[in-house]
């Protein structure tokens, strides 16, 4: 049963930011996490600020060689947007396995990131896309890399008076490919046992110029496998290079044993998934 709270319905972002400046007020959009936690007794906000219908928070646009996604954009929006399919297939692939259609129609990108679950499906693809978040308060607007924003289990650098109003990332250059895969206990509506995303760019000679590998549900926060990335840069993506990078990605994981899988299982499957994703990215780049 939900505890009592005040539901505030601002008409503008500015009005919402003023409400959030009050202690104990929390933003709510889709409510797929915010309304579950009070029911479970994890916290009891005195007020919820409904931002679901605020103008300007939902939508995807291209600006200054970046894709800019409003924090109120739903997971279904990501799944159906042609610019996401073209430039960020990893994010579309994550949206396709995000919970179920009912949740995808409600859950927002900003909410998924601000909740900061280690298993957040949108975090690994956005990490390999070099995304940053935009936070707004009544007094200022600031940006920071997503990698810095996520600091631990259900912990971010968002202040209580801020809204995550947008996520942005550079449009990948020619010769790039990015992909995502999630492993769960069933095909749909399941929390990740582990997930991974990769993004690579190769030059005209076939040598890797940039590589990013991100892992989800394998540490207290989504993380980058930086040693594996460094190995790939400057060389061709041969079977041997991909295999060694996958091994290093498995070593980067810091999983735990829980009801969804053992730490040993997670490390082993991480290697397999990263290897498959790198091979898929290479094949995609070659085909392009």
Image (spheres, rainbow, N blue to C red):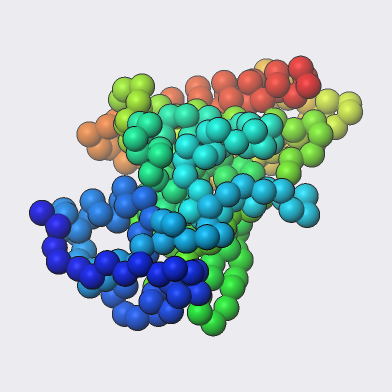
Number of numbered discs: 0
Residue 44: percent from the left, percent from the top?
A: 20, 66
The answer to whether residue 14 is left or right of residue 202 is left
Asked whether the viewer can see residue 228, the reply is no
**Residue positioned 13% across, 63% down in the render:** 3
Q: Looking at this view, name the residue that lies furthest to the front.
A: 11
Quadrant into which the C terminus falls = top right
The answer to whether residue 42 is left or right of residue 118 is left
Looking at the image, is 146 positioned above or below residue 176? below
Asked whether the viewer can see residue 172, the reply is yes
Residue 202: percent from the left, percent from the top?
A: 80, 31
**Residue positioned 35% across, 31% down in the render:** 100
Residue 186: percent from the left, percent from the top?
A: 31, 22
Closer-to-camera residue (140/4)? 4
**Residue positioned 31% across, 80% down in the render:** 23
**Residue positioned 54% across, 67% down in the render:** 135
Quarter assignment of residue 167: bottom right
Looking at the image, is 65 positioned above or below residue 159? above
Closer-to-camera residue (64/279)? 64
Quarter assignment of residue 121: top left
Looking at the image, is 254 positioned above or below residue 8? above
Residue 7: percent from the left, percent from the top?
A: 27, 67
Quadrant into which the N terminus falls = bottom left
């Amino acid at each position: 049963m939900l505890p009592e709270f005040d539901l505030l319905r601002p008409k503008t972002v500015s009005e919402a930011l003023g409400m959030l400046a009050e202690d104990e007020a929390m933003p709510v959009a889709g409510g797929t996490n915010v309304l579950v936690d009070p029911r479970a007794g994890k916290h009891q906000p005195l007020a919820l600020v409904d931002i679901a219908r605020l103008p300007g928070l939902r939508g995807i646009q291209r600006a200054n060689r970046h894709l800019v996604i409003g924090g109120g954009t739903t997971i279904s929006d990501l799944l159906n947007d042609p610019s996401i399919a073209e430039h960020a297939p990893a994010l579309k692939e994550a949206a396709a396995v995000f919970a179920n259609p009912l949740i995808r129609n409600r859950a927002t990108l900003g909410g998924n990131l601000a909740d900061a679950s280690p298993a957040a499906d949108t975090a690994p693809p956005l990490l390999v896309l070099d995304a940053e978040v935009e936070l707004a308060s009544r007094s200022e607007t600031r940006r920071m890399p997503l990698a810095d924003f996520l600091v631990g289990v259900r912990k971010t650098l968002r202040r209580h008076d801020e809204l995550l109003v947008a996520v942005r990332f550079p449009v990948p250059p020619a010769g790039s490919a990015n992909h995502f895969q999630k492993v769960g206990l069933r095909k749909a509506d399941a929390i990740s046992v582990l997930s991974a995303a990769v993004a690579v760019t190769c030059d005209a000679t076939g040598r890797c110029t940039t590589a990013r590998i991100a892992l989800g549900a394998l540490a207290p926060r989504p993380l980058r496998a930086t040693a594996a990335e460094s190995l790939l840069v400057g060389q061709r993506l041969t079977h041997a290079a991909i295999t060694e990078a996958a091994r290093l990605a498995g070593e980067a994981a810091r999983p735990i044993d829980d009801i969804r899988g053992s730490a040993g299982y997670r490390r082993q499957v991480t290697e397999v998934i990263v290897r498959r994703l790198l091979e898929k990215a290479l094949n995609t780049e070659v085909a392009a």
